[in-house]
Image (cartoon, rainbow, N blue to C red):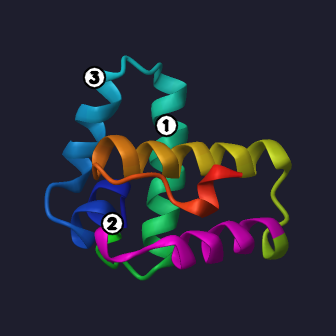
Amino acid sequence: MSMTEALDQSQSGLMSRVHRAIQSHKLNQRTEQTYLHWITRYVVFHDLKDPTDLGDQEQQLFLGYLQQRMRVSRARLNQAKQALAFFYEEVLGQMPQAALAG
C-alpha cells in the first residue's frame, strides 16, 4: 500500500491536505519525505483510523512503540514528534498534544 492510499483510506483527501500544508510552509523535499514517512507510519500503526479520532494516548502509544520496540534513535524519535506536531497543527488544525510537547 502506498503512502497516498494509506492516508486517503484513513480520511478522504488527507494526502493532498498534507502536501498542501508542506508546500505552504515551503519545506524542502527531504523534510517533506520525512514528514510523510512518519505521518503514514502513524496512520498505519493505528490501522488506518481517521487521525482526528486519535488523541494524546494514541500518539504516546506510537512514540513509545518507536522508542521501546523499534529502538529508534533520539534524532528519529524527534523527527517523528515534529512530523506529528506539524500534522496535527498545520494539516488537521488541532492544538499540539501533550505527547508531542516534550
Residue 78 among magenta residues: no
Residue 83 sits above or below residue 21 on the image? below
* Residue 69 spot, x, y in % from top left: 80, 76
Circle nearer the N terminus (3, 1): 3
Other residues around mark 3 within 10 Å, as few (<14) / some (14–19) / many (≥20): few
- Circle 3 sits in a helix, a strand or a loop, which is it? helix
Q: Main secondary structure of the magenta part?
A: helix
- Tag of residue 24: 3
Circle nearer the N terminus (2, 1): 2
Q: Amino acid at mark 3?
A: Ser
Of the 4 image quadrants, the one containing the N terminus is bottom left
Other residues around mark 1 within 10 Å, as few (<14) / some (14–19) / many (≥20): few
Distance from disc 3 to disc 2, alpha carbons, whole Å, reads 22 Å
* Residue 34 spot, x, y in % from top left: 55, 40
Comparing 3 with 74, the one in front is: 74
Q: Amino acid at mark 2?
A: Ala
Which residue is located at x 33 percent, y 54 percent?
94
Q: Amino acid at mark 1?
A: Gln
- Circle 1 sits in a helix, a strand or a loop, which is it? helix
Circle nearer the N terminus (3, 2): 2
Which residue is located at x 44 percent, y 21 percent?
27
* Residue 26 spot, x, y in % from top left: 37, 17
- In the rendered structure, are the residues bearing label 3 and label 1 in contact, judged by CB atoms less than 8 Å apart? no
Q: To which residue does mark 2 refer?
A: 6
Q: To which residue does mark 1 refer?
A: 33
* Residue 90 spot, x, y in % from top left: 33, 40
Residue 61 among magenta residues: yes
Residues drawn in magenta: 52-67
Distance from disc 2 to disc 1, alpha carbons, whole Å, reads 15 Å
